[in-house]
Image: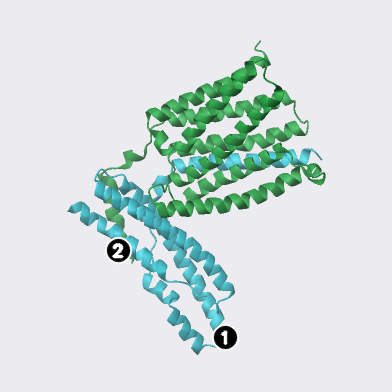
Amino acid sequence: MTVIPIVALAILAIIFLLFLSYQTWWQSGAEGEGGIDNLLPVDLDAFRNLTDPEEAHFLRLNLSPEEFRRIQRIRLRATAMYISVISKNAGRLVVIGRSVSSHPDAEIAAAGLDIVHRAVQLKLWCSLSLLKLNATTVWPTLLSPSSRIADRYLDITSLTASLPTRVAA
Amino acid sequence: MISLHFISIYLWVAPHVLLALVAAFMFRSHRYRDFPVFFGYLLFEILQFCVLFSLGRLVNVSVSTYQQIDMFGRAGSIVFRFAIVQELLEASVARSPSLRKTAAWMLKCAAVFLALLASVFIGSVYSWNVRRMIFPAYAVNHALNLVQCGLLAFVFLWHRFLRLKMRSFVIGIALGMGLVASLDPVLAALDNFRAMDSLLVNLLQLGAYHVSVLIWLYYATVKQEATSYADVTSVRHAHESAVELGRLI
């Protein structure tokens, strides 16, 4: 009987040490994933349409409750896919922002840092939204997703797009 | 042949001498400004060692007094280690007060959750004590070590989730702390269940701490590589990305 706790603790320790080693290895090569090749397309108009409360209201009025729930679940799954892509792009923007934040020009560096912070916030928002979306899928008639993520995404991409202008000036 | 007594004295003294070196490197490279809690922990450990070492050499100090001071030192170390985990988590978002608050809040939630899990796990491991309503200090220590491991895993996952590159020194601190925190409960369990000789367990615990101090020393001497990334390429890269993003939206 005494062997069980020792084995349990030893297995936990080994798993944790393997995890530490893997994370250390991953961190040593983490900077290389911010390339533009990795950016994924996001159709923000379609995303806004999916998260538009008026659109949901229209569907609710014109469809039977069963049909509305079915359609709304499909819309919610599509919304979740969009948010996942936005979250991934936000992660890449963090990497881009970090590389810019170490620029010798103080103004550009500050802008880079701003991009990092906004991208991190966006990523956290995406995670919370995905959690909420999972709950919404269960009760599609009670909750509806928010479209604020699209605005935040637009803000941060505009900020990144304005960077080269400042560099040129 | 080197005696076990000599090895145990070496494993007790050497890590603390190396800790002083780590503190000196941190002071010289001004890293103590970025990691004040870890720097404080180093000083605390050195002070604790000096006090205990001196008490051990004094003849008129009772065993109970020595144990009380030792216990006080261990409690202080545990508090410091939890504060260090928070420092590691906030290191990447130090310049953003709102993100720091978010990080601190998430860490508190994770700590409470992990404390519950660890208590249940350690309670089941030492169930023969729980039935007798005994709550031994070492079981609490093991539970806290498990919580610490969980929180360190959380630090790594937090950085990975946000795609934030950890500073090399942060990795070093986490690695060293993780090594000690994960091996301590295992070695203690081997000792408690008489699976291994107490003296050998003690030596292994000291050895693990020695290795973790060497890890800290190595990472304290490594220069931060982040600044080398700053050049024209990074802005051109951002420009290309911005163009690409403009196309995408």
Residue drawn at x 48%, y 71% is A78
Q: Examine the rendering and report whether any part of residue B162 can be seen.
A: no
Q: Is residue B189 left or right of residue B149?
A: right
In the image, what residue type sits under mark 1?
Pro
The percent coordinates of residue B152 (x first, y second) are 55, 43
Label 1, label 2: how far apart the Cα atoms are: 40 Å
**Relative height, residue A78 to residue B144 (above, below):** below
Image quadrant occupied by the C terminus of chain B: bottom left
Chain of the residue displaying label 1: A
Where disc 1 sits, the SS reads helix
Q: Which chain is green?
A: B
The residue identified by callout 2 is B246
> Residue A65 bears which disc, if any?
1
Taking depth in this image into account, of B193 and B139 the one nearest to the observer is: B139
**Badge 1: residue crowd in 10 Å (few <14, some 14–19, many ≥20):** few
* Residue B188 found in image quarter: top right
Q: Is residue A28 left or right of residue B3?
A: left
